[in-house]
Image: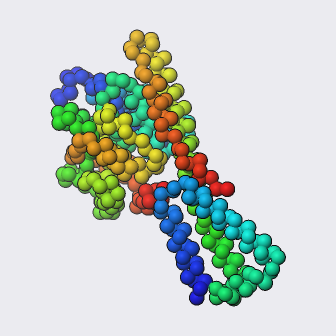
Amino acid sequence: MTDASPAGPVPAPDTWVVVPLYNEATVIGDVVRGLRERFAHVVCVDDGSQDDSVRQAAAAGATIVRHPVNLGQGAALQTGIEFALAHPDMRYVVTFDADGQHRVEDAVEMVRRARDENLAIVFGSRFLDDRTRPGLLKRIVLKTAVWVTNMTTGTRLTDAHNGLRVIRRDAAERVHLTQDRMAHATEIVLQLNRTGLPWAEQAVELIYTDYSKAKGQSLLNSVNILVDLVVR
Amino acid sequence: MWIQILLVVALLALGFVVLRRPGSDSHQALRRLLYGLFVLAAILSVLFPQWLSWLARLVGVGRGTDLLLYALVVMFFVFVYTQYRRNVAIQRQLTLLARRVALQQALEEERAAMTGSGAPAPDQSQAVTRQSDASPSRSTSSNPD
């Protein structure tokens, strides 16, 4: 598949892609295969899936890290980051959702930008351009999440709960997620912001398929996120 | 009425404690003080049954049993909050344990796969030391007693 693709010569050997994985058997194979065309190291952190996810991901060429019990996406992300950090030649961690809503090209572009502009963190944002068109309700939920994140972390992001991020090693070393469930998206922004390392946001497109829509954040779950953040 | 003021104050204090960052020691001290007060009130009520009714009338509640019910409601909220904190602490410990198991297994598998191809093995000690520096030191003090 790497037959002289237009933009990427060799799959990046110093970049680890971390994919938190929980019951995504129908899509994970394609997601991993897509990533493997451009990235040498794809790590799926299986969070206790009950379906065929692990076999599909492994068959597609991902390294599997298995949580013995289901802990939540935040916990899976932290495990994946620590797994990547265990490799001395790792320079960048890319976090990538398992449900197929991110574009691999966006991830490649973000890593390239981190290298070129010497950035420690690149956040993906679906609101920087108008490629992504979430529905009204989803837009309200996401914008509220952004607002809460910016209020609690002192950053000025345009998109909070976007699973696509590039984190350089020095920044990744300072991430210690304690929010096992979805509030980690805010927590990771807070911790990365505290590092004081240079960061940027980059426009990415989110592909809303019926599948990812069905899996996505519900309005009620944003209540959970708020409670998790406020009550500690 | 006095009882309304008392209940509102108690609930507000509870809300304040919940929102505040858990300064473990003072939390524990507060719990122990409350516990001591509870024991004292229980003994007094047994020795002088009228005492509770007297107190109830003093704060504007008709009967001692009503006062007991109100106190129970407040204590229930305290209980719910304490259990919530405890659950969070236990979940945290479970996460760290599960992560350690997951990393150890994955790195071992990777090393086994790599020794065949002769590539450099990943540094496992690094992952394990990182585990320990995130130990939930304050969670141990959140056990209700």
Residue A193 in view of the camera: yes
Q: Which of the 4 image quarters holds residue B97? A: top right
The image shows residue A29 at horizontal and vertical percentages of 39, 33
Whole-percent x, y for residue B140 in the image: 59, 47
Residue at image location 50% in from the left, 35% down from the top: B132
Residue B64 position, x and y percent, is 73, 82
Q: Where does the N terminus of chain A fall, quadrant-wise?
A: top left
| A196 relative to B71 in the view: left or right | left
Which one is nearer the viewer's eye here, A23 or B7? B7
Vertical side of B48 occupied by B75: above or below: above
Above or below residue B47? Residue B103 is above
- For the residue pair A183 and A126, the one nearer the viewer reads as A183
Q: Is residue B129 left or right of residue A132?
A: right
Residue at the spot 17% in from the left edge and 36% down from the top edge: A117
Give the residue at the far right of this rendering.
Answer: B47
Number of residue marks: 0
Question: A139 or A190: nearer the eye?
Answer: A190
Q: Is residue A214 visible?
A: no
Asked whether, in this view, residue A201 is left or right of residue A24, the answer is: left
Q: What residue is shown at x 45% (from left), y 40% (from top)?
A: A76
Colouring: rainbow
When the figure is inspected, residue B15 is found, relative to residue A212, above or below; the finding is below
The quadrant holding residue A60 is top left
Residue B11 lies left or right of residue A114; in this view the side is: right
Residue A156 falls in which quadrant of the image? bottom left
Residue shown at 76% from the left, 71% from the top: B42
| Residue A44 place in picture, x, y as percent | 42, 34
